[in-house]
Image (cartoon, rainbow, N blue to C red):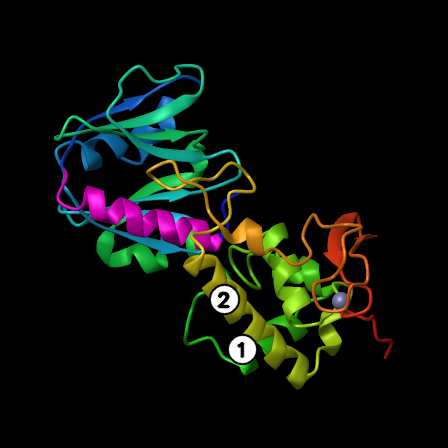
Amino acid sequence: MPEVPEIEIMKDEMSASLKGRKIERVFVKHNADLSSFIEFDLFESLEGAAIKDLDRRATVLIFHLDNDRSFLVKLYTFTEVTLTKMSNFNENDTQLVLDLDNGGFIWFSGIRVSDSSVTSTENVEQHHFFDELGLDPMDKALTVEELKEKLRASRGKLKNNLMTPWVVAGLGDLYTDEILFDARLHPSLDVSQIRHNEAESLLNSIRTVMGDAMNLGGSSENNWHHLDGSLGKFDEHISVHHRAGQPCYVCTTPIKKVRYNGRFAYICPNCQRFKRR
Ligand SMILES: [Zn+2]
């Protein structure tokens, strides 16, 4: 699944080729409930409008249009967004196609109608997609206090909470494993008891891992790729995720796949010790 770094990269790459492009026609293919698209004025808002800019908030990709409206799409494991010159797309899969004035198309495959919307650009921030949405791991203004407060107000284990959108928005399995290893924190740590220095390490590691992911062009673990088809290189620098049985790069202890609360995490049992309190 693309996580925040991949969507951020996608947003930048798409911005470069889509700015100023006019959407000539909107096609909705198979399996999509057309009435819902009509309900939120998808066709009326998009057809004839030019793309001014792209934005991202958590896992939502936002297209700002020159008619003061914005088109929002929440991305999931099964959503694929492609820019292409071809029109013979796979009809069984593609659900929304935007036909551009330069002969290109934007395909949204596996798009969920309930997870796409149009709103006035002015009110994007107030859109219900962002209600109760947590901290953005890429937000440079994020503070240790905010992170600590948010975690302490939640219940349960650290890894689950980092993957919960109302705590931190847009982190999945891969990056949470890597962040926890970088911070030397155990995924089962009870968040209600997180200490200031632990929240500090966590925030530093969120920044380090997100920065590395951006510099290395994201991860292609879940079939994600750049617009030009090239793969992300973060996978070549993974410390723990999917490395069970292989030696830890820091201490050579074999990486372990641990199960808790029905979830899995990859840890170095030596670098990330569980401390009882
Ligand atoms: Zn280790």
Q: Residue furthest right?
A: 276
Q: Kindly indicate the quadrant of the structure image that contains residue 37.
A: top left
Q: Quadrant of the C terminus?
A: bottom right
Q: Mark 2 Cα within 10 Å, few/some/many (few <14, many 20+)?
A: many
Q: Is residue 271 above or below residue 28?
A: below
Mark 1 vs 2, N-terminal side: 2
Residue at 53% x, 78% y: name it.
146
Residue at 76% x, 70% y: name it.
271
Residue 64 appears anywhere in the view:
no
Q: Position of residue 179 (x, y in %)?
A: 61, 64
**Relative depth, front residue between 32 and 180:** 180
Residue 146 is marked as: 1
Asked if the stretch drawn in magenta spans residue 15, the answer is yes
Q: Disc 2 designates what residue?
A: 135
Q: Secondary structure at mark 1?
A: helix
**Relative depth, front residue between 277 and 242:** 242
Q: Position of residue 217 (x, y in %)?
A: 42, 52
Asked if the stretch drawn in magenta spans residue 83, the answer is no
Residue 201 appears anywhere in the view:
yes
Mark-to-mark CA distance, 1 and 2: 8 Å
Q: State left or right for residue 68 relative to residue 188.
A: left
Residue range (magenta): 4-21
Q: Amino acid at mark 2?
A: Leu
Label 1 with label 2: CB-CB less than 8 Å: yes
State the predominant SS element of the stretch in magenta.
helix
Q: Position of residue 1 (x, y in %)?
A: 54, 42
Q: Kindly indicate the quadrant of the structure image that contains residue 83.
A: top left
Q: State left or right for residue 127 relative to residue 186.
A: left
